[in-house]
Image (cartoon, rainbow, N blue to C red):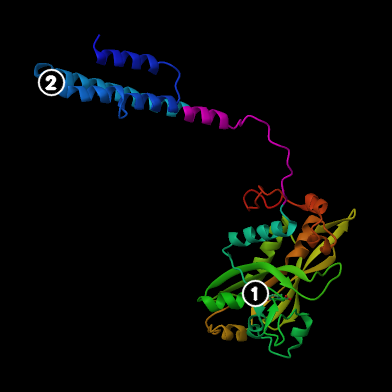
Amino acid sequence: MSDLKKIKEEFLLKLNQKLNLTDINQIKSNLFGKNGLISSQFKKIGSLAENERKKFASDLNITKDELQNLIDTKIKQIQDAEIIEKLEKEKIDITLPERTFVRGKIHPVSQTIDEISSIFSEIGFCVEEGPDVENEYNNFTALNTPDNHPARDMHDTFYLDEKKEKLLRTHTSPVQIRTMLKDKPPFKIIAPGRTYRSDSDQTHAPMFHQVEGLYIDKNVNMGHLKGCLNYFIKEFFEVKKIKMRFRPSHFPFTEPSAEVDIGYEIKDGKIIIGEGDKWLEILGCGMVHPNVLKNVKIDSTRFQGYAFGIGIDRLAMLKYGINDLRAFFECDYRWLNHFGFDPLDVPSNYRGLSR
Ligand code: DAH
């Protein structure tokens, strides 16, 4: 047997054993290394007789290529097997039962905000936001509440600096100003968010939530306001009929102004919304004062509209039978577990608001 054949057969024997990458690298260097078997054969070529030389060189090159290919294939096989072995080890068994864990709940205030946003977006309102830290101008002056106006005292404001220029917004109404300053009419927005007043008892918390509404266009009137609020209250409380009354009131930023009460009664210790002979105040509203429009450079002879401000926590308490406002903000896990909502049940007008 020629040397080349011998080398090849020995190599094939070795290759059929179980090998890892280190073994195969060792074999490679035994063949093709500086003093490797194949490399030594190449050195022999020069000493061969003229007539043998050509054939030997050709055989040698063929053998070399064959061996090289076999080694490459083997390396690839070993690498693939290693990957498969790794994947097998890391496999996740998706048939295992889930671990028992307690899923978080959506706070009733967040739920109520989602419900309100869903109802108003259905009739064309966009949702706007404003910062909790406001300036005095947006919170009061631009809303036709100048310095020394008695309404400022009623708000029990938390001021953040000595000059009383920065404050925690006392209502969501400054979002009206921000919205109208950054764009051109028409506007049809709601702005839910946190508001702050220095006040605390069973029905007042220093931080509470409001939603502002603003609709400015040509020919908007008080009738539209009534229709909109009537629709909202019915949708929100998920009732077909609602008793509702508009009482004359006063807000510096609206003229005329009104407060809205809804009818209710108590049956078997439970509050029933929409019927009965008792009244509950739930919001303030009115036609936007021409001075407010002037402050945001809107021509009040061409555009007018309505605004409203609703206390969100109050609505949540009524709808979900919660009787102490302070519980909302105490972060009591048991309370949240009882009154909270499933995070996967996003309120929508089609699927139902609350279930
Ligand atoms: N900002 C008022 C408050 O907090 C509520 C309010 C009343 C908002 C009338 C309005 C409105 O937009 O038109 O007491």
Q: Secondary structure at mark 1?
A: strand
Q: Is residue 217 above or below residue 244?
A: below
Question: Hey, which residue is sitting farthest top in the picture?
Answer: 1
Quick one: label 2, few (<14), some, or many (20+) residues within 10 Å? few
Q: Quadrant of residue 100?
A: top right
* Outermost residue to the right: 268
- Residue 201, given in percent of the width and then of the height, sits at 86, 70
What residue is rendered at 34% in x and 17% in y?
11
* Residue extending farthest left: 51
Q: Which residue is mark 2?
A: 54
Q: Give the left or right position of residue 194, taking residue 79 as reference.
A: right
Q: Is residue 274 magenta?
A: no
Pick the residue in front: 211 or 167.
167
Q: Is residue 27 left or right of residue 312?
A: left
Above or below: residue 58 compared with residue 317:
above
The magenta segment: 82-105
